[in-house]
Amino acid sequence: MKRVLVSDSMASEGIEIFRNTPGIEVDVITKHTPEELKELVSGYDGLVVRSSSKITKEIIGSAEKLSIIGRAGAGVDNIDVAAASKKGIVVMNTPGGNTITTGEHAIAMMLSLARKIPQATASMKAGKWEKSRFMGNEYCNKTLGIIGIGRIGTVVADRAKGLKMNVLAYDPFIAPEAAEKMGITLATLDEIYGSADFISVHVPKSKETTGMINAEAFAKMKKGVFIINCARGGIVSEKDLYEALVSGKVAGAALDVFEEEPTKNMALISQENVICTPHLGASTDEAQTSVAIAIAEQMVDYLLKGEIRYAVNFPSISADLMNAMAPYLNLSEKLGKFHAQIISSGIQEVHIEYSGEILRFDVTPLTIALLKGLLTPILNENVNYINAPIIAQERGINVKESKAALWAITAA
């Protein structure tokens, strides 16, 4: 019997999958301190979390039986993946399960910001009728600048085009042909800053993106620009945003994420021209049901059959091959990360040449490992061994493999 602990609130449909599967026993314990969770987890084979539970190195260290952690969602920043990997614990997520929901939330925030709907609602609930106070802005024929055109950014672009907005997108790692197919005009950051009426951020949080929307960036923007951040807190500098709002350079901001959550930055969120939500990007019934079902099915397949899907720290290859291929997988991923550091424009093609003893095996996992290493610095948490080829395809990257004949290598 495999025991699974669900430590955060999760849609009942996912829990029922565990309960109705022979060989699986599930407990739902959502109210606990970190110390209590550290003691609880030691008796379980699987752990399911959302964003509330912080799975630290200390908690992982106390997990004697734990073999898998499942995140009902895309982000795994609340899990110490390195510690889990070192201990041989598979970490799975559900990439794409909340893509549409988060993209739609960004659009909803933009429209609410433009028409001052939250402020007008609060005014009316206070018994007032201040029609002239809440003069809004149209978005038809306005320019939306999207920073980061991954899955969520693509959803935002698609919805914005339906609103008859002009869409500019900045993403140095997408091929021009792929952008053209999506009907998106690629632009530099400076071009977006200089012409966009609305700017929406959709990049992962990393060393490169933390604080990228700062005082220097605001100085380059049009006066009266609107800022939307439904990606990750800290990408937009809250201090610099506050100053830009007070000076009038930024006409308004819509924020779903913050540098510290729950936020204590009351000076920022109390501004009349700021609307905000408590990290609700993925919070719809449809999305939560989708990710709950997905993670439950993935974990059942792993615990009972050893099948690995959507792992962020483990390739999808059989255990028999792992020992032989592990060094090659490690090398392939490092080569990909190395090339990610030296490129400076959109990637159009990846050409991998194989030769030697490795040709005795299926090299597909090695190609995937290289793509994962190449794309991880760009998309961070959303790239894993399963979705790396799909992301490459979506970005118009042509992947080629060539192989030298094994007999020729041996003869040499």
Image (spheres, rainbow, N blue to C red):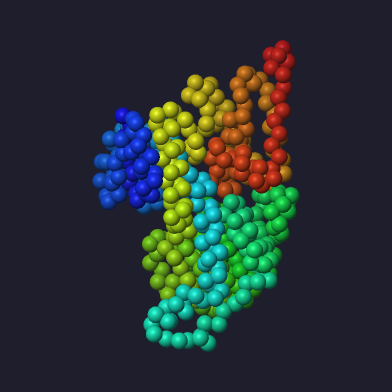
Taking depth in this image into account, of 309 and 174 the one nearest to the observer is 309
Can residue 211 be seen at all in this image of the molecule? no
Taking depth in this image into account, of 58 and 269 the one nearest to the observer is 269
Question: What count of labels does the image hold?
Answer: 0
Query: Residue 274's x, y, as percent?
Result: 48, 73
Can residue 132 be seen at all in this image of the molecule? yes
Relative to 27, say whether 1 is above or below: above
Query: Residue 51's x, y, as percent?
Result: 40, 51
Residue furthest toward the top?
411
Q: Quadrant of the N terminus?
A: top left
Q: Quadrant of the C terminus?
A: top right
Tell me which residue sits at (57%, 79%) in the image: 136
Residue furthest toward the front?
20
Tell me which residue sits at (54%, 76%) in the image: 115
Is 335 situated left or right of 6 in this image?
Answer: right
Is 100 situated left or right of 195 in this image?
Answer: left
Tell me which residue sits at (63%, 67%) in the image: 163
Question: In the picture, residue 301 is in which quadrant?
Answer: top left
Is 150 situated left or right of 13 in this image?
Answer: right
Query: Residue 198's x, y, as percent?
Result: 61, 69
Query: Residue 206's x, y, as percent?
Result: 53, 52
Tell me which residue sits at (50%, 39%) in the image: 310
Taking depth in this image into account, of 114 and 358 the one nearest to the observer is 114
